[in-house]
Image (cartoon, grey):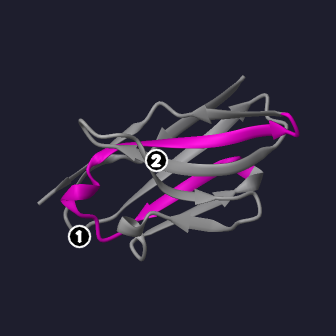
Amino acid sequence: QVQLVESGGGLVQAGGSLRLSCAASGSISRINDMGWYRQAPGKQRDLVAGVTSGGSTNYADSVKGRFTISRDNAKNTVYLQMNSLKPEDTAVYYCKANVGILLYRKDYWGQGTQVTVSP
């Protein structure tokens, strides 16, 4: 099994910054894509940013230029640096990791961390 543990959420004023971390542990053969998703109350869970094992990144349009995703493969950790935060960024943020090789690949999710941005 693989466990993902997120940290770094909290309450911040609009315009502020937060850095989220997500560390993977357990039976890890290979971590492929990693990503951050968020879910606001009453809304679906959406992709915020993703990063491949090779370091290629993609972002939701709403966070481009403000958020930066990165990963440390030696630590099995993915980060999300969030700058210029807006109240509409308020949500529970989840990390996801695709782990395994060839046909034995599986997605794992963290427990989520709350990010609240006050006006």
Query: Looking at the image, is mark 1 or mark 2 earlier in the sequence?
Result: 1
Mark 2: few/some/many CA within 10 Å (<14, 14-19, 20+): many
Residue 69 coordinates in the image, percent (x, y): 54, 63
Residue 46 coordinates in the image, percent (x, y): 42, 48
Residues in magenta, as a range: 75-103
Q: In this orientation, which residue lies closer to the viewer: 24 or 44?
A: 44
Which element type, helix, strand or loop, lies under badge 2? strand
Q: Quadrant of residue 103?
A: top right
Task: Please tell me whether residue 94 is drawn above or below residue 68 in the rendered image.
Answer: above
Mark 1: few/some/many CA within 10 Å (<14, 14-19, 20+): some
Q: Quadrant of residue 71?
A: bottom right
Q: Which residue is mark 1?
A: 15
Does the segment drawn in magenta span residue 80? yes
Residue lying at 56% horizontally and 44% vertically, measured from the top left: 22
Does the segment drawn in magenta span residue 1? no
Which element type, helix, strand or loop, lies under badge 1? loop
Residue lying at 35% horizontally and 69% vertically, measured from the top left: 83
- Say whether marks 1 and 2 touch (CB < 8 Å): no
Q: Which residue is mark 2?
A: 37
Q: Quadrant of the N terminus?
A: top right
Residue lying at 70% horizontally and 47% vertically, measured from the top left: 76
Q: Quadrant of the C terminus?
A: bottom left
* For residue 116, side relative to residue 93 (left or right): left
Q: In the current view of this chain or complex, which residue is farthest to the left?
A: 119
